[in-house]
Structure formats: C-alpha cells, structure tokens
Amino acid sequence: MALTIDTFEDLVRIVETHPEWRRRLKRALFDFDIEASTRALEKAVAELVSVQARVWPAIERLLAEQSKQSADIAVLKTDVAVLKTDVAVLKTDVAVLKTDVAETKQRVTRMGRDVADLKGKSYEHDYLLKAKAIFGRFIRRGRDRTDDMADLMHDAVAAGQISEKELTQVLAADLLWGGKTRQDDKEVVLVLEASWRAEVTDVERAQQRAATLRRIGVYAVAVVAGSEWDEQALSLANSLAVVTAANGTVDGDSWRKAAQMEM
C-alpha cells in the first residue's frame, strides 16, 4: 500500500502508527544515544549534588568565620575608637598635670622666697631689738642713728656732696646704729646689712653705704650679719675690712681690722 504524505500531520500519524519506523527515525535524526546521554547527565548531576553536599558545609563555615571576623573587626574598630578617646583624654590630663606641676613649682619657689624673706626680716628684727647687747662689747651708749644720719645727708645733698639716690640707699640699710667706741671713745656709726644667708651683695651694699657716710665726714663702719655665710661673701668682707657677725655675735678680729682702717 502506498503512503502519501502531503502535510506534516500525515508524517506524524504514520510515525505514530509504525513504532519501528519511529525508532529508526530517532536514530536517523539523532546521531547519539539519548538514553545513554540521559544516564550520563543524571550521573553528572548526582556527582554535582554530591560535590555540593561536601562543599556547602565548608562554604557555610567560611561564611560563618567571615561573619565572625566582621564582628571582630567591628569590635576592634570600636575598641580603637575608645582607645583614641582615652588617649585624647590622657593627653589632656597630662597637659593639666604639667600645668599643675608648673604652678606648684612656682608656688614652691614663691614660698621659698617668702620663707627666706621672713627669715631675713626676723633676723633683721633680732639685731634691731638686741643691738645694745650685740654691739655693746665695742660701743657704749649705743642708739639708733637713722634720724641723725638723715639730717646730715639731706644737708649733704643740698651741698652737692652726695646724690638723692645715695641718700635713699643709705637710709635703706637694715640698721644705722651709733655710739662711742670703747677703744678710743670715738663717735662711730655702724651700717648694718642683716640676712639669713649673707652673700656678696650684702657685703657690697654695706660697704658702699658706709663709704657714702664717710664722704660727708661720718666715721662709718660696714657690718654684715648672717646666720649662714657664703664663702665668697666672707672672703670679700675680709678683703674690704667689713665687720662680720653671725647669730648675734660680732667677730672680734673683723672689728679690730675695721677699726684700724682710716676714715
């Protein structure tokens, strides 16, 4: 029987009614074994699933570790921020501490000067109160000669013998004490500089002020008293024939050396 194929539907009908033709047509149309390919594909998929089953836990662990690392990094960033804040606060505290230390040093320095001034004032006051006893070994009828010397120096300024500055300097002496010397009954005025620690400047001031009085005819002797003595000051006092005293006691040798000096 002849088969007539006019349309695609005729071809489909003929193939469906002849199974052997259908198998042959498949082989003709496809040059590979579909069933074998399907089995190979199923095997590859199974292997892929197996690989996924093995790999996925590792991926999950990696993701978990990454998440933990991210959390740790976030904590670390927070800690660093806190540390920066603490460092800034510490720097501020150190700056404040340095300022406090500097202020404390200044206060201690001022306190030291104040204590030195108080000790010096106290030492001066002792010589003022005890002048009769301290200088009584060498001077009789001793008394404060400040007013007398002020009158003489004002006349000397008017006469052009000394300057106003020299007058002021002499009157700034810690004590102007005078009387008659026991050795030769000669009128003498002591120009005293008293400091807790006697230094070169004390010796120089006493000597300069006594020299000003000697220029206007006063027999003046420079005296420096100190509870403690700077070695250079003691050496200078000896070379200038300045009388030295310590703790209320006049050095006899220095007095005799000064007395031998001409006015």
Image: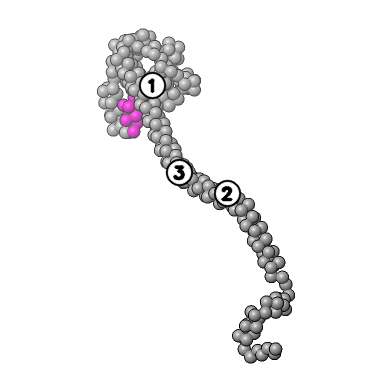
Looking at marks 3 and 2 on the same chain, the residue that comes earlier in the sequence is marked by 2
Using the rendered view, name the quadrant where residue 213 is placed.
top left
Relative to 84, does residue 162 appear above or below in the rendering?
above
Q: Residue at x 47, y 46 (%)?
A: 78
Q: Residue at x 64, y 80 (%)?
A: 17
Q: Residue at x 52, y 46 (%)?
A: 72
Q: Counting other residues with Cα less than 10 Å from the Cα at mark 1, is it few (<14), some (14-19), or many (20 or more)?
A: many
Residue identified by numbered label 3 = 82
Residue identified by numbered label 1 = 195
Q: Counting other residues with Cα less than 10 Å from the Cα at mark 2, is it few (<14), some (14-19), or many (20 or more)?
A: few
Percent across and percent down for residue 233 are 46, 22
Q: CA distance from mark 1 to mark 2?
A: 87 Å
Q: Colour scheme used in the picture?
A: one colour
Q: Is residue 73 visible?
A: no
Q: Amino acid at mark 1?
A: Ser
Relative to 193, does residue 96 appear above or below in the rendering?
below
> Of residues 174 and 182, which is closer to you in this image?
174
> Of residues 27 and 85, which is closer to you in this image?
27
Q: Amino acid at mark 2?
A: Arg
Instruction: State which region is magenta.
Output: 165-174
Looking at marks 1 and 2 on the same chain, the residue that comes earlier in the sequence is marked by 2
Residue identified by numbered label 2 = 61
Tell whether 250 sits left or right of 232.
Answer: left
Tell whether 231 sits left or right of 211.
Answer: right
Q: Is residue 137 visible?
A: yes
Q: Are marks 1 and 3 in contact (CB under 8 Å)?
A: no
